[in-house]
Amino acid sequence: MLEIKNITKRYDDKTILNNISLNIEENDFVSILGPSGCGKTTLLKILLGIETSCEGELLLNKKNIIHTKPNERQFSIAFQNYALFPHLNAMENIRYGIKNQKQPIGEEELNNIIQMMDLKEHINKPISSLSGGQKQRVSLARALAIKPKVLLLDEPISALDGMVKEKVKNLIMASAKKLGITIVMVTHDPEEALTMGNKVLILNGGHIEQFDTPANIIKKPKSEFVEKFINNLLILKFNNIKEVLDAE
């Protein structure tokens, strides 16, 4: 469905991404994980089309879209900082993304997304009155409303805490399953990466350390880096990671 072929990105003499290649299947939920500066956000921007690559191709259903404009790629994104318009209410923010769609979403579908994101009682409220969790749900609803083939998530729950974080996490996973869309998520949190997606891409220094299932990342690390990077999590987050292993 989505094929990333030999993507390389350099800034001056510094290589940020080095010959990145992988295949993402339809309905995959891929978590991109790695230390700060490993290239994960740059890769997400290249997928979205707001950053250019120096080399490589990006194939969506076998069509190269590497030079396609962002609004024509059938991708959408929800950012960590929400990127909402403060002068618009929740519904106006959600509708903003669908204004220029060739085949805009129907009202019934839109209402289903609003209900799915548990926003019905907040839909006419100004953005300034919403909590962080509510703002993120508006951001997700806006991204879903353009009916993307691929939904990109940039640290979608890292700014949230406790039960709010868990609620948004569960909503993301449920919407992916219900709507049947492909998701690519950037996160710095190994627990999020290993428990939300069915595939995990671990980057380090601009190259791929491992692209595998969560269980294989834990049980069969392909490098010393992966083993060390994941190891502390097994102690700190044992219960959630045990669920990953038990599900395999």
Image (tube, grey):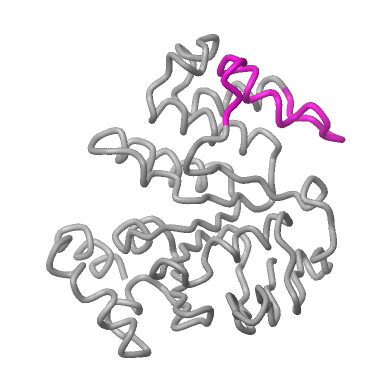
Picture layout, residue 161 above or below residue 223: above
| Camera-nearest residue between 232 and 26 | 232
Residue name at image x 60 percent, y 66 percent: 43
Taking the image as shown, residue 162 lies to the left or right of residue 182, namely: left
Picture layout, residue 168 above or below residue 194: above
Magenta portion: prevailing SS class: loop
Numbered disc total: 0
Quarter occupied by residue 236: bottom left
Picture layout, residue 140 above or below residue 221: above
Q: Position of residue 143 (x, y in %)?
A: 62, 38
Residue name at image x 50 percent, y 59 percent: 29
Taking the image as shown, residue 126 lies to the left or right of residue 94, namely: left
Residue name at image x 55 percent, y 55 percent: 183
Quarter occupied by residue 164: top left
Residue name at image x 38 percent, y 37 percent: 168
Q: Residue furthest front?
A: 12
| Camera-nearest residue between 185 and 1 | 185
Q: Residue furthest right?
A: 102
Magenta run includes residue 247: no
Magenta segment, which residues?
Answer: 84-106
Where's the N terminus, which quadrant?
bottom right
Where's the C terminus, which quadrant?
bottom left
Picture layout, residue 133 above or below residue 191: above
Q: Position of residue 4 (x, y in %)?
A: 68, 74
| Camera-nearest residue between 17 and 190 | 17
Magenta run includes residue 103: yes
